Image: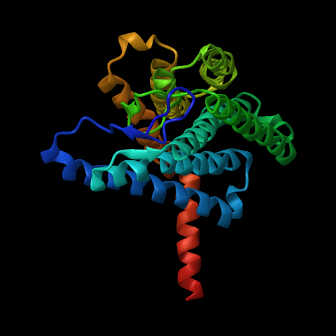
Amino acid sequence: MTGNNQSVISQFLLLGLPIPQEHQQLFYALFLAMYLTTVLGNLIIIILILLDSHLHTPMYLFLSNLSFSDLCFSSVTMPKLLQNMQSQDPSIPYVGCLTQMYFFMVFGDMESLLLVAMAYDRYVAICFPLHYISIMSPKVCASLLMPLWMLAIFNAMMHTLLMTRLSFCENNVIPLFFCDITALLKLACSDIYIIELMIFIMGGPIIIVPFLLIVMSYARIVSSILKVSSPQGIHKIFSTCGSHLSVVSLFYGTVIGVYFCPSANNSNVKETVMAMMYTVVTPMLNPFIYSLRNRDMKGALIRIICNRKISF
């Protein structure tokens, strides 16, 4: 399975989740239900936005991209986890591991970048309502989305290519349920300084800066609302911001905890649970918090169902 030095390990072993054998089937059913909920919720959002012309606005353009990103982000890890739980075979080929890592980074980065784009959209809508249409025109939104996707793809490609230069020796056990870059770096037996440096350099514009911008956006929104709105309006905005910020905190809190806190202080179980939160729970919650509670989305669903009934 290994060579002397440079011969790369042909496969890795994913330890998965620390679940007792007698509870495997119960957790398999739970994770399958969570994954199907994620897929169904995000697909409904994408289809509604595509079919209903009332939702062809900047906010829902970002939401459709977020739903697509969430759907893919969860699909990168969950099918393999479910397969491993059923087959009891934790192996993943070397190429498959790097491929999983690449797509995990692409859609994970897009999750972060889209959250800040959505926060900016809400900031403009609430703080500059009269100029919203001119500031957030379709051209501006398209020109904003394209660089975000390119940045996510470039970052993932760069790290994946750097990973191919590493050699792995005897240890091939990954203490997670997916191929994570930090877990792979711990298994490498060649110099990892360059990759670690790039993680911190690129982690700023992709994780830390978006998080700070989101906090600033919501702070400006709250400040603006407190000055002009009625008590009912204040309550509505606070409840909306609270919901958004809860998912933002869940996603960024666990990501920062895994990737930017000293790994020596994190047990494997703690890292696995934190990874589960942002890879499985957050993509499942986003449809409910960002869209399915939204009046426009409910209206679109009712219109499409009624139109179908009339056509039949």
Residue at 47 percent of width and 27 percent of height: 169
Return the residue nearer the eye: 168 or 207: 168
Q: Quadrant of the C terminus?
A: bottom right
Q: How is the image coloured?
A: rainbow
Measured as percent of width and height from the top left, residue 179 is found at 48, 37
Above or below: residue 160 compared with residue 264? below
Residue at 59 percent of width and 16 percent of height: 191
Which residue of the protein is positioned furthest toward the front in this rendering?
A: 4
Instruction: Examine the image and state in which quarter residue 154 appears.
Output: top right
Residue at 29 percent of width and 37 percent of height: 17
Return the residue nearer the eye: 246 or 192: 192
Measured as percent of width and height from the top left, residue 247 is found at 48, 33
Residue at 29 percent of width and 55 percent of height: 87
Which residue of the protein is positioned furthest toward the bottom in this rendering?
A: 312
Return the residue nearer the eye: 88 or 164: 164
Instruction: Examine the image and state in which quarter residue 117 appears.
Output: top right
Residue 223 seen in the current view: no
Q: Quadrant of the N terminus?
A: top left
Measured as percent of width and height from the top left, residue 34 is found at 36, 50
Measured as percent of width and height from the top left, residue 176 is found at 38, 33
Count of numbered circles on the image: 0
Above or below: residue 21 compared with residue 217? below
Residue 92 seen in the current view: yes
Return the residue nearer the eye: 46 or 176: 176
Above or below: residue 115 compared with residue 26? above
Query: In the rendered view, does 176 fall on the left or right side of 149?
Result: left
